[in-house]
Structures are given as C-alpha cells and as structure tokens.
Amino acid sequence: MKIAVSGKGGVGKTLVAGTLARLFAKDGFKVLAIDNDSAMNLSYTLGIDEDVKSKIVPISEMKSMIEERTIVPGAGSGVYNINPEVADIPDKYKVAGPNGLQLLVLGGIEEPATGCLCPENALIRTLLYNLFVKRDEVVIVDFEAGLEHLGRGTAKGIDVMLVITEPSQKSLDLCSKIIKLSKKLGIINIYLVANKIIDDSQLSIIYEKIKSWNVPLYHSIPYDKEVGNADLSGSSPIDHNSNSEAMVSIMSLYGKLKKLKSEVFDL
Ligand SMILES: Nc1ncnc2c1ncn2[C@@H]1O[C@H](COP(=O)(O)OP(=O)(O)OP(=O)(O)O)[C@@H](O)[C@H]1O
Ligand SMILES: [Mg+2]
C-alpha cells in the first residue's frame, strides 16, 4: 500500500506520516518512509538515531549523481535526460530506523517561478513515480506543503491520499484544492484527516464546510501538548509518550488503514 500525506504547511503532515510509518513497522510490515519536504523533519518524527541522521544527504542535493544520470552524452548544456535511471536509488541511499523501518530523504522539489524543468526535479519526480508504482512495501510519503508536487507521474500509484487539515479556513481551502486535483489525477481513496482539534464545535464547522466535497472526514486527531513536548525534548512523539492523546488517536487511524489494506489492497 502506498500512502501519501499532504496539506498546508504546519498542519501535522510529518506527525501523521512519521507516526503511521512507526506503527506499520512495529506491526511487522516492511516500511519505506519517504521525506519529500525540503525541511526534512521526518527523521525526527521517526526517531532516527542522531549519528545516522547527521549523515543524511537528501537525494536532491547529490549533484554529481544527478548529473551522471541525467546527462546526455554529446548534447549541449540545457539538454538532459528527463527519464533517468532511478530503480537502484532507494536501496542505495535509504537509512535504517526504529522497528526495522527504512527512510529515504528525497528533499523538496524546487519549482522556480520560471517553471524550469531542472535535472533535480526530473530525477525526484521519476523517483517518486518509481516508489509509488514499483516498490512492494508499505510506502509512506511525507509531501511538501501545498500541491505543486502533485502531477500525473507522482499521483500514479498512490493508493491512499491522506489530506491533513487543521481547524482553519485557509487549511480547509487548500485541502479542497488538493482533493480536486487528486480526483482529477485519478486517485480513488482520498481521505480528510482533521488534526489539532480542541473541541467538537470545530469538527461541526469542518463537517459543514466539506458537505459538498464527497470526501469523508476519515479521522480526527486532538490537539495534544505532548506532541510539542516531544519536539522540545528532541524525541520522536511516539517514543516520548505513546499513550498521549494524539498518539492513541493516530493508532486508531492506523487501525483503519490496516483494515483497508487487508480488505482492499491485499486481494
Ligand atoms: N495534534 C497535535 N497537537 C499539538 N501539536 C501538534 C499536533 N500536530 C502537530 N503539532 C505541532 O505542529 C507543528 C507542525 O507539525 P508537523 O511538522 O507535523 O506539520 P507539517 O504539516 O509536517 O509541517 P510542514 O508543512 O512545516 O512540514 C509541530 O510543531 C508539531 O509539534
Ligand atoms: Mg512536515
């Protein structure tokens, strides 16, 4: 099963992606977590060892490797291969994390105002396509905020798109755009997840707003100060306090996804 996590900046994408990755791995699934955000926070949420973390170089910054794979011999500058060989990259550059999970840090896709199709972008996009379509494990991608990352290639093979919202109109507005685009790109299982919920009145407003979207509010996660405390203490939220309200709630989200996996994707 391939799960992508998207939404506005700061809504909790990394918290959800990282905690789900840990829970799948803890349950014995083979898990590949992908960090596709230029801020590269996923390793913290996953609880990757400090010495491993400090050595990670995001794929998007491996200039010579990218050049090697995108260069067209004999062609002038500005000409490069937009479909580079990437199949070996995940296994070559992934690092090990807790519960046997693996992490691959891609880095972000830079989309300059000029709309440049740089070799880095071509390689990351081809890699994402490859990860979604070809890998056989549970793949969980923590996308960069916004919707620039979503294209025909990257959407292909996404089994479940979790769109995370916080209780704010701005966040919901972006979710609406992400959902429309995801549908257009043919993603079938699109689920809205509300995060940082403080009381039921917030959920009522969200329900009202999404009435016409034809997408269920699949799950809601409470605001939980333990998540911030984990951050402050420099530990992964699930290691910091696995019984905190947010963790217990993400465990229940995990239960739903595991059921979906066995009922729909393992047939
Ligand atoms: N349920 C929650 N309760 C309390 N704080 C939360 C909760 N979820 C996330 N946070 C806090 O909100 C901030 C953003 O969370 P996170 O990094 O997971 O979001 P993000 O969507 O990945 O952000 P970005 O777009 O910057 O990558 C963090 O400081 C995190 O500790
Ligand atoms: Mg993030």
Image (cartoon, helix red, strand yellow):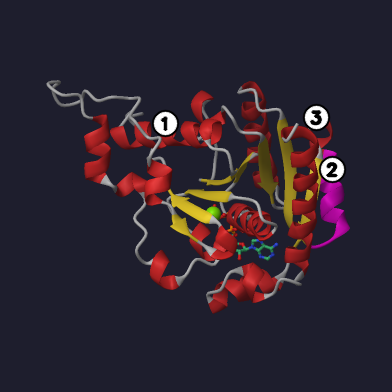
Q: Disc 2 designates what residue?
A: 207
Give the quadrant of residue 179.
top right
Which one is in front in this view, the residue at disc 3 or the one at disc 2? 3
Q: Identify residue type, mark 1.
A: Thr
Please name the residue shown 74% across and 58% down the image: 250
Report the residue at 77% width, 33% height from top: 264
Q: Secondary structure at mark 3?
A: loop
Q: Is residue 106 visible?
A: no
* Position in image of residue 147 (x %, y %): 54, 36
SS type, badge 1 = helix
Instruction: Write the residue at 50% across / 37% down.
Output: 131
Pointer 3 and pointer 2: residues touching (CB < 8 Å)? Answer: no
Distance (Cα) linking label 2 and label 1: 37 Å
- Amino acid, disc 2: Tyr
Image depth: mark 2 or mark 1 in front: 1
The picture places residue 242, in percent across and down from the top left corner, at 71, 71
The residue lying toward the viewer, choosing from 135 and 175, is 135
Could you tell me which quadrant the C terminus lies in? top right
Q: Residue at x 34, y 63 (%)?
A: 55
Which picture quadrant has residue 159?
Answer: top right
Of residues 61 and 197, which is closer to you in this image? 61
- Main secondary structure type of the part rendered in magenta: helix
Range of magenta residues: 198-208
Residue at image mark 1: 126
